[in-house]
Amino acid sequence: QQHMWYYIDGELYVSTDIVTGNYNSMDTPKGYWSVNSKASPCTLVGDGYVSYVTYWMAFIGSGYGIHDASWRSEYGGQIYKGNGSHGCINTPYDAVKKMYAKVKIGTPVIVY
C-alpha cells in the first residue's frame, strides 16, 4: 500500500504515504522487526550512495530504517516500482519528525 501507520497505546499518531525498496531489486524485507537504534542527524552510506538525513530509525541491523528523504517530492502510489529506495522506508519530513520524537528503541516495525 506504500503507507505507514504509527500507533501509540492503540491510538493512531501518524498516518502517511511512504516509498519502500525498489520493487524486485531492493525490496524492503517483509517481517516483524523492532527499532534498534536512532540517530539525528545521520549520514547513510551504501553501495553507490551517501545520503544525509535528519531522522534515522534503524529496524534491521544498521542497513534498513525509517528516515526522511529530502530528495523526494512525492510519496506513495507506484513510485517504488522503478524509483524506490535501497530498502529503507522513505518518509515525508514532517511525519518522520513527529515519529522520531516518540519512537523508543524496541518499538515494533511490521512490514507486509
Image (cartoon, grey):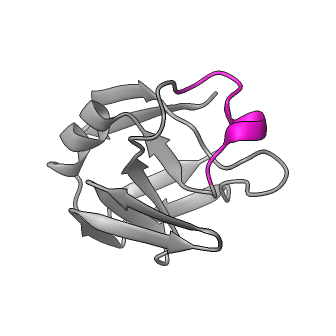
* Residue 78 falls within the magenta-colored stretch: yes
Residue at (59% x, 49% y) in the render: 111
In the image, 47 versus 75, the foreground residue is 47
Residue 83, above or below 78: below
Residue 46, above or below 100: below
Magenta stretch, main secondary structure, is: loop
Indicate the position of residue 60 as horizontal and vertical percent values: 52, 71
Position of the C terminus by quadrant: top right
| Residue at image coords 36%, 68% | 43
Please tell me which residue is depicted at 74% across the width and 57% down the height of the picture.
26
What's the magenta region? 75-85
- Left or right: residue 37 versus residue 17 is left
Residue 54: x and y in percent read 26, 54
Q: Nearer the viewer, residue 109 or 27?
A: 27
Does 106 lie within the magenta span?
Answer: no
**Residue at 64% across / 74% down in the picture?**
47
Of 6 and 47, the residue lying toward us:
47
Q: Is residue 73 left or right of residue 97?
A: right
On screen, residue 16 versus residue 63, left or right, reads: left
Check the image and report above or below for 84 versus 31.
above
Figure quadrant of residue 9: top left
Q: Quadrant of the N terminus?
A: top right
**Could one spot residue 11 in this view of the protein?**
no
Can residue 93 be seen here?
Answer: yes
Looking at the image, the residue that sits furthest to the right is 24
